[in-house]
Image: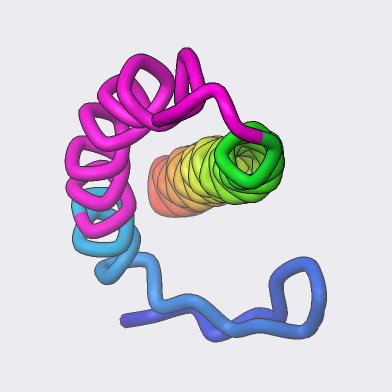
């Protein structure tokens, strides 16, 4: 029977859905990591297309924008990792509660 006790932030999580949630977030991370790795290598413009001021200004603006977007993706990756850690903690808490309940029931039935 699902325990619908409120979790942190007022969310209720059915313990049977935790593995599915973890897989979804792990899949998202698996898709994001190669994008981040490639973006870190290919996004910055190493040099302007031409030696004129407009090209130099475009390069600077592009690199600034690329860096901001890369920072946003990196923050998203960190948040996904935090969610996975939180789901792991919730799963451990449910498992511990289940074990405690089983021990208490065994003790009551054995008395």
Q: Residue at x 19, y 43 (%)?
A: 31
Q: Is 30 colored magenta in this rendering?
A: yes
Left or right: 41, with 108 as reference point: left
Q: Residue at x 49, y 17 (%)?
A: 47
Q: Residue at x 64, y 46 (%)?
A: 54
* Scheme by which the image is coloured: rainbow
Q: Residue at x 47, y 43 (%)?
A: 84
Q: Can residue 7 be seen?
A: yes
Which portion, as a residue range, is magenta?
A: 24-52
The residue positioned farthest toward the front in the image shown: 52
Considering only vertical position in the picture, is 104 above or below 40?
A: below
Residue 94, position in %: x, y? 50, 52
> What number of labels is visible?
0
Q: Can residue 86 be seen?
A: no
Residue 99, position in %: x, y? 45, 39
Q: Is 14 colored magenta in this rendering?
A: no
Looking at the image, which is closer to me, 70 or 26?
Answer: 70
Of the 4 image quadrants, the one containing the N terminus is: bottom left
Residue 49, position in %: x, y? 40, 30
Left or right: 51, with 68 as reference point: left
Looking at the image, which is closer to me, 46 or 103?
Answer: 46
Residue 18, position in %: x, y? 34, 60
The residue positioned farthest toward the right in the image shown: 9
Left or right: 20, with 6 as reference point: left
Looking at the image, which is closer to me, 43 or 76?
Answer: 43
Residue 15, quarter of picture: bottom left
Magenta stretch, main secondary structure class: helix
Residue 64, quarter of picture: top right
């Amino acid at each position: 029977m699902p325990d619908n006790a409120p979790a942190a932030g007022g969310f209720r999580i059915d313990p049977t859905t935790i593995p599915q949630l973890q897989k979804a977030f792990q899949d998202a991370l698996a898709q994001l990591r190669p994008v981040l790795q490639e973006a870190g290598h290919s996004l910055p413009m190493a040099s302007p297309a031409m030696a004129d001021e407009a090209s130099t200004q475009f390069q600077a603006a592009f690199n600034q924008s690329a860096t901001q977007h890369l920072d946003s993706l990196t923050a998203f990756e960190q948040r996904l990792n935090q969610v996975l850690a939180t789901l792991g903690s919730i799963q451990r808490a449910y498992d511990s509660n289940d074990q405690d309940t089983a021990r208490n029931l065994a003790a009551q039935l054995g008395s």
